[in-house]
Structure formats: structure tokens, C-alpha cells
Image (tube, rainbow, N blue to C red):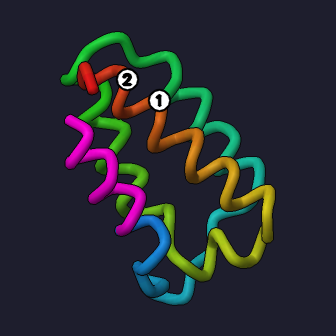
């Protein structure tokens, strides 16, 4: 699972914006809460699909260090839920 977490972190920091939309800071915080509430792989997979759409490079950069910290927190919670 460590490889999966590293791949997710890489994706979070290298993805380009899709359709020009940016997630708000509140959206990222809500996604982190949702990710950290997951207790199993099925839940983590569902949240990861949302994260793939929401966590674009532009969305993260728009919120600076706070955005990066939230993205990292999301990745950590998803990895923990998946058993990694």
C-alpha cells in the first residue's frame, strides 16, 4: 500500500486542472474529513474517485501551503483506510 500512497501523492502534485474548475478550501476540508472517516478499502476507493476529480494542481496551488497540507492529509487517510 505504500506504493499506492506514493502514487496518489505524486498524482496530487502533478495533475493539471480539468475543465478549469478549482475546489474551494472548504471542499478540500470536507474531502479530508470524508477520507479520514473511512474505515475500509471500499470507502477509501469511493473517496479516492472524488479526490481524483477535485485535487488538481491548480486547486492545490490556489490554496498554498494549506492546500498542500489538506491534499497530504487526504492521501494519508486514504492509505490508512486501505491498510497501508
Residue at figure coordinates x 21%, y 23% from the top left = 41
Residue on which disc 1 sits: 77
Residue at figure coordinates x 43%, y 79% from the top left = 14
Circles 1 and 2: CB distance less than 8 Å?
yes
Q: Is residue 73 magenta?
A: no
Residue at figure coordinates x 30%, y 49% from the top left = 49
Q: Give the vertical position of 14 relative to 5 (above or below).
A: below
Callout 1: 10 Å neighbours few (<14), some, many (20+)? Answer: many
Where is residue 44 drawn, in percent x and y?
31, 30
Residue at figure coordinates x 76%, y 48% from the top left = 26
Mark 1 lies on a secondary structure that is helix
Residue on which disc 2 sits: 80
Query: In this picture, which residue range is highlighted in magenta?
Result: 1-10
Q: Is residue 3 left or right of residue 49?
A: left
Q: Is residue 7 left or right of residue 80?
A: left
Q: Give the vertical position of 42 relative to 75 (above or below).
A: above
Residue 57, by quadrant, is: bottom right
Chief secondary structure of the magenta span?
helix
Amino acid at each position: 500500500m505504500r506504493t499506492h500512497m506514493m502514487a496518489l501523492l505524486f498524482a496530487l502534485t502533478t495533475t493539471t486542472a480539468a475543465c478549469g474548475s478549482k475546489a474551494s478550501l472548504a471542499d478540500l476540508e470536507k474531502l479530508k474529513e470524508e477520507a479520514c472517516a473511512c474505515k475500509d478499502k471500499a470507502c477509501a476507493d469511493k473517496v479516492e474517485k472524488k479526490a481524483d476529480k477535485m485535487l488538481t494542481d491548480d486547486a492545490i496551488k490556489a490554496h498554498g501551503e494549506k492546500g498542500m497540507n489538506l491534499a497530504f492529509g487526504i492521501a494519508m487517510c486514504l492509505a490508512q483506510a486501505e491498510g497501508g
